[in-house]
Image (tube, grey):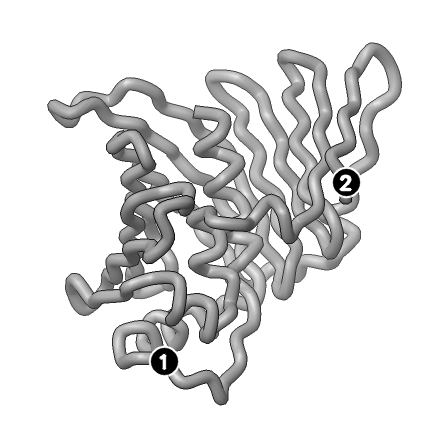
Amino acid sequence: MKSIVLRLLTLFAAVVIFPASAQVDDATAELLEKLAPIQQLQGRFIQEQFDEQGEVLLESAGSFKLLRPVYFKWQIESPDRQLIIADTEFLWHYDMDLETVTRRPVDDSVEASPLQVLAGDATGLSSSYEVTRATDDSFVLVPTSSTAGFRELTVHFAEDGLSRLDIVDRLGQQIKVTLLDLDDASALTPEAFVFTPPDGDVDVFYYDN
């Protein structure tokens, strides 16, 4: 489940900029148009993983913050405690229960992940994913590469913007992330995404280039 969380994250960190001049198909252009208004966003989430019969295997809940172009904070509060923060350079993952911190370059962390979908690169999105419009408010994305971190991603929108992500991972597991209590008006600054490993008995691992 934790690897899914890490893949998912840079998904949001990726709801960023895209070149308006990029040539994309209609469905991709419509998806990018839906994402374009998101400049900053915060709220809560519920993440569920299902078995083949549709029964919930695992459920986690927490809060998140997003600030374009690259800042992202995803905090799992239950059942375990994890914090993931992305800034201009690094993706930090702090597992509070295991008392471990890892740091990876953002570019490496988003490779072949669902987060890359919302990364804001219209050319990359068009060339790396087959995008179809499922309904007026949902889009299905299928990676063209066999090394992608998931098989299929469905992005759902509601009247107030992004509302849910449905993911089928490489093992065929179903994951649903529902976004709640969304707030796109409260000001966010890069200072809200600064992370320093805590002092004390915490193991820190750097996976830098």
The percent coordinates of residue 173 (x first, y second) are 27, 30
* Nearer to us in this view, 30 or 76: 30
Q: Residue furthest bottom?
A: 21
Q: Which mark is residue 149?
A: none
Label 1 Cα crowd, 10 Å radius (few <14 / some 14-19 / many 20+)? some
Rounded to the nearest angstrom, the CA distance separating label 2 from label 1 is 33 Å
- Counting the numbered discs, the total is 2
The residue carrying mark 1 is 24
The percent coordinates of residue 33 (x first, y second) are 39, 77
Q: Secondary structure at mark 2?
A: loop
- Picture residue at 48% right of the left edge, 34% below the top: 5
Q: Camera-side residue: 113 or 192?
A: 113
Which residue position holds label 2?
208
Placement of 10 over or under 185, stated as above or below: above
Position in image of residue 153 (x %, y %) = 31, 50
Q: Percent x, y for residue 123?
A: 46, 74
Which image quadrant for residue 151? top left
Is 44 on the left or on the right of 98, as rendered? left
Q: What kind of residue is marked 2?
A: Asp
Within-10-Å neighbours for mark 2: few <14, some 14–19, many 20+:
few
